[in-house]
């Protein structure tokens, strides 16, 4: 599977993103699972922040952020073993449910931000992102508060 850069250069395909990654993007501060992972995610975040009209598609499996992840295996996410893909899918479902979206939906990044702004509260992250190693750092809560003009 290629990285986002490779797929983006192939044409005008929408950027594929698992739903929970919409939240990760908002809180991103340069941390990740490897240098390749961080470099790829940084490019994605810069593109979305500088071009909010970028089209995204909700992915039901590993996406353009997962592509270079050292935890990506044949059966999907294996961050904490074989059960991780199911954990991550449930995280995705918690986000799509709140955003009233399903896998395959295509919207601009600006619209995704608007839906997150109106549908997800900072307190929701305790439930949506439980067990995520990055949640205790507070970056994602701070990003969401900034998006909602709360902080
Ligand atoms: S940890 Fe799992 S869900 Fe997160 S980027 Fe890596 S493969 Fe994707």
Image: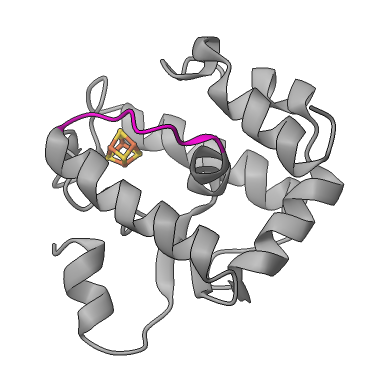
Across and down, in percent, residue 137 comes to: 50, 12
Instruction: Relative to 13, say whether 21 is above or below.
Output: above
Residue at horizontal 37 percent and vertical 57 percent from the top: 44
| Res. 128 in view | no
Indicate how the structure is coloured in the image. Answer: one colour
> Where is ligand 1, by quadrant?
top left
Pick out the residue farthest to the top.
136
Across and down, in percent, residue 62 comes to: 32, 52
Residue 30: quarter of image = top left
Residue at horizontal 24 percent and vertical 51 percent from the top: 40
Instruction: Relative to 7, say whether 20 is above or below.
Output: above
Magenta residue span? 27-34
**Quarter containing the C terminus:** top right
Query: Is residue 8 toward the left or the right of residue 20 in the image?
Result: left
Across and down, in percent, residue 138 comes to: 58, 16
Residue at horizontal 54 percent and vertical 65 percent from the top: 103
Residue at horizontal 21 percent and vertical 53 percent from the top: 67
Query: Is residue 56 toward the left or the right of residue 141 in the image?
Result: left
Query: Is residue 126 toward the left or the right of residue 64 in the image?
Result: right
| Res. 88 in view | yes
Across and down, in percent, residue 91 comes to: 54, 36
Residue 99: quarter of image = bottom right
Residue 78 highlighted magenta (yes or no):
no
């Amino acid at each position: 599977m290629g990285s986002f850069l490779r797929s983006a250069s192939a044409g005008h395909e929408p950027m594929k993103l698992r739903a929970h990654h919409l939240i990760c993007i908002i809180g991103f501060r340069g941390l990740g699972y490897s240098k390749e992972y961080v470099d790829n995610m940084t490019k994605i975040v810069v593109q979305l922040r500088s071009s909010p009209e970028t089209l995204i598609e909700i992915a039901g499996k590993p996406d353009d952020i997962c592509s270079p992840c050292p935890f990506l295996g044949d059966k999907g996410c294996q961050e904490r073993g074989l059960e991780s893909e199911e954990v991550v899918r449930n995280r995705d479902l918690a986000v799509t449910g709140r955003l009233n979206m399903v896998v395959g939906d295509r919207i601009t990044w600006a619209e995704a931000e608007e839906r997150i702004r109106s549908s997800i509260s900072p307190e929701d992250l305790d439930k949506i992102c439980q067990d995520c190693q990055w949640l205790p750092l507070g970056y994602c809560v701070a990003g969401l508060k900034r998006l909602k003009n709360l902080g």
